[in-house]
Image: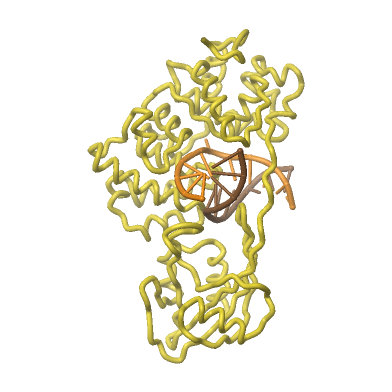
Chain colours: A yellow, B brown, C orange
DNA sequence: AAATCGGGGAC
DNA sequence: GTCCCAGATTT
């Protein structure tokens, strides 16, 4: 039994109009050069919650560094994180490597082509599984992302809240009936490309839309009221103190973040959360001692950094400190100069500190 | 079901 | 400032 939303809907004509438009108007993108499952996979992970224009240079560099599944499987963690530096959601690349290693070991380096097997891989959720299966293996599986929910909410006048997790299942159920069995790749990519180029979040270009005739929202003139999406609450502010600790050679102390949680595995300057930003040298010295496990006195406050995440805002005061004698370098800590520091992956917030510190004569 | 997990670009 | 982006995982 077909989904009720598709009664009186011309499915085959919709498929044809969408696929023809996609074939004529799709952008030339590096991951569309061929259908190599590994290349498709990497692109889909990078594209999660990330714009095409942002991904392109990262994708080109990543495929140059890790051209094959095996290259990625055997790479060191600091190298893959460096390749991901600035892209955000860093667990994506750690999960990708975990999954690639499983494919090498369990599937003889061939990306599995069944929903059950591919969905079991780390970091491969419902969207990514459908995207790889349809694009690389021509399997008629739905790949429901934000674009698809926006486009179909308008075409079929669906007013479920797309911010709710279960709403994705509604669209998946519809797409099983709607998807082209002859060309599921162009169908899925066509929906996404349409969302990116025409059926945009604000002021959709309906007059240029290839499926305008099929669109219930357009025919009612209510395309601007869809999709329905509840708002998320705003980020919480955290006051931080970060420290550039310099040794007698002018090298600075960096440390590796824990392998779980926010910015896992990236490198940073020692830092702590503070109650307030009053510049009190004794207070800050105590905070620094807590951060690196050594008593050291503060020299100056040199910079203020504000960094906005989705759910947190870091308000960082940056201090310098000098140690007279270099006497330690514990596990997960390094003293590096301004050239060595380039080999380590830093969160953007601390890249701002590097840039400022090494461009001035402190 | 809600929170966590980055960063940037468009408005 | 707000929204949202080819989402997945954890709580």
- Number of marks in picture: 0
Q: Is residue A153 or residue A187 the one in the foreground? A: A153
Residue A362 in view in this figure: no
Q: Which of these two is toward me, A60 or A162? A: A162
| Residue A286 point in image, percent of width and height | 56, 83
Position of residue A258 relative to residue A212, above or below, is below
Judged from this view, the residue extending furthest toward the top is A8
Q: Position of residue A223 (x, y in %)?
A: 72, 25
Residue at position x 53%, y 19% in the image: A20
* A349 horizontally vs A70: left or right: right
Left or right relative to A275: residue C6: left
Q: Residue at horizontal 36%, vertical 39%?
A: A121
Q: Residue furthest bottom?
A: A324
Q: Nearer the viewer, residue A250 or A289?
A: A289
Residue A56: give x, y in percent of width and height: 49, 45
Q: Residue at x 42, y 86 (%)?
A: A249
Q: Give residue A201's position: percent from left, percent from top.
A: 67, 35
Please tell me whether residue A254 is drawn above or below residue A101 in the rendered image: below
């Amino acid at each position: 039994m077909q989904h009720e939303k598709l009664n009186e809907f011309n499915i085959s004509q919709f498929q044809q109009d969408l696929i023809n438009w996609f074939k004529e108007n799709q952008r030339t993108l590096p991951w569309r050069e061929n259908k190599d499952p590994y290349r498709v996979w990497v692109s889909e992970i990078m594209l999660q919650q990330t714009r095409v224009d942002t991904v392109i240079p990262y994708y080109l560099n990543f495929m140059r560094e890790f051209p094959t599944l095996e290259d990625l499987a055997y790479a060191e963690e600091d190298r893959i994180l460096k390749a991901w530096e600035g892209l955000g959601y860093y667990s994506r690349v750690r999960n990708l490597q975990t999954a690639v290693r499983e494919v090498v070991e369990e599937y003889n380096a061939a990306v599995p082509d069944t929903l059950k097997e591919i969905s079991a891989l780390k970091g491969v959720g419902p969207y990514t599984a459908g995207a790889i299966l349809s694009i690389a293996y021509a399997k008629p599986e739905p790949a429901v992302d934000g674009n698809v929910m926006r486009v179909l909410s308008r075409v079929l006048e669906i007013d479920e809240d797309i911010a709710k997790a279960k709403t994705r299942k509604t669209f998946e159920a519809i797409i099983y009936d709607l998807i082209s069995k002859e060309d599921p790749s162009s169908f899925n990519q066509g929906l996404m490309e349409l969302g990116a180029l025409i059926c945009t979040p604000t002021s959709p270009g309906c007059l240029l839309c290839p499926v305008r005739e099929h669109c219930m929202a357009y025919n009612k003139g209510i395309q601007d009221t869809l999709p329905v999406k509840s708002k998320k609450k705003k980020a919480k502010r955290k006051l931080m103190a970060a420290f550039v600790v310099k040794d007698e050679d002018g090298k600075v102390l960096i440390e590796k973040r824990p392998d779980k949680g926010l910015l896992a595995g990236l490198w940073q300057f020692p830092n702590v959360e503070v109650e307030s930003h009053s510049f009190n040298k004794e207070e800050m010295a105590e905070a620094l001692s807590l951060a690196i496990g050594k008593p050291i006195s503060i020299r100056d406050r040199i910079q203020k950094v504000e960094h906005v995440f989705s759910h947190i805002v870091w308000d960082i005061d940056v201090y310098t400190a000098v140690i007279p004698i270099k006497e330690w370098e514990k596990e997960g800590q390094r003293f590096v100069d301004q050239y060595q520091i380039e080999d380590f992956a830093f969160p953007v917030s601390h890249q701002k500190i590097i840039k400022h510190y090494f461009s001035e004569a402190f």
